Amino acid sequence: MGPLRWTVWDEQSGEHQTNVQEQPQIHSLLELPAEAARRGYQAVEVCHFHFPSTEPDYLAQVKLAFREAGLSLDTLLLDYGDITSASSRRTDADVEYIRNWIDIAALCGAKQIRVVAGEAAPSDEAAIFASANSLSELSAYGRTVGVTVVTENFKALTSTGASCKKLLDAWGEQARTITDFGNFHGPLKYEEIALTTPQSVSVHVKPQYDTNGYPDEAELRKCLDTVSEAGFNGAFVLIYDGPGDMWEGLDRVKRIAADYISA
């Protein structure tokens, strides 16, 4: 997908900056929908750092590319934002930044946008309730432009099942999340997956890999069994970030997940 455009907060200037990480481009964002459709996918998720432009004309091209491919842009994954920062200057700027990306999601045809709940400690109850309040306001704004706001067990605040559940309960009836198999760790991992599944719009099927990029099938099936037994009825999003060809890596994950997706 070419260079990655990471958003960072510059404390000194009080502004957002972009750091570009160079990497090869095999497919452009405009080419991705047709390629994914050709390979049998029904939808994709795209990270915000994959967008080379956020100008309205370009976003219209992205929307058209997905429409012509017959593919859904399921979720725009916004990888930046700390709405629990101790700095009100930053939280105000980040909330405004997120609102802008909600508008971008609407223009490019994304069904929903994933917003980071925050980087405060998962034991910080004040931060959990502050995050829930901001997410509630952001989701209300999203509804005005036809984009659903969701969060994920991603970054510190939602790194435990308990903090996720507390956040979702405080957020209320509009609360939606993504459960990523790779973001819970430790002996409670499967209990935490089951705890967040009822409010999950999708699961990120992210395996543990060996050095050659082959998934631990038994472990991945345990994750998939967990969400199946919890009554999951959402999207299975295949994740591969190991070595070698990305499409081949995804095929290895797909082979395992297919038993659950077709059920």
Image (spheres, helix red, strand yellow):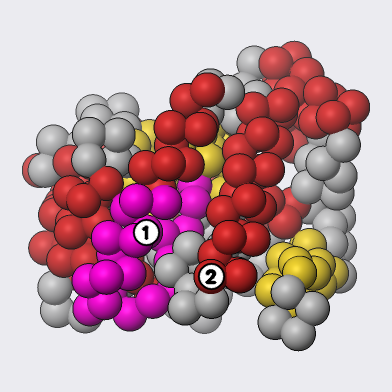
Tell us which disc is closer to us: 1 or 2.
2
The picture places residue 125, in percent across and down from the top left corner, at 22, 71
The 10 Å Cα crowd at callout 2, few under 14, some 14 to 19, many 20 or more, is: few
Q: Which residue is mark 1?
A: 131
Mark 1 lies on a secondary structure that is: helix
Task: Tell me the magenta residue range.
Answer: 114-134
Q: Is residue 204 visible?
A: no
At x 82%, y 41%, the residue is 54
Left-right relation of 101 to 189: right
**Which of 143/46 is in front?**
143
Which amino acid, by three-letter code, is at mark 1? Answer: Ser
**Which of 39/164 is in front?**
164
User: Quick check: is 127 in the magenta stretch?
Assistant: yes
Q: Which residue is mark 2?
A: 88
- How far apart marks 1 and 2 lie (CA) works out to 13 Å
Seen as rendered, the residue at the extreme bottom is: 12
Which amino acid, by three-letter code, is at mark 2? Answer: Ser
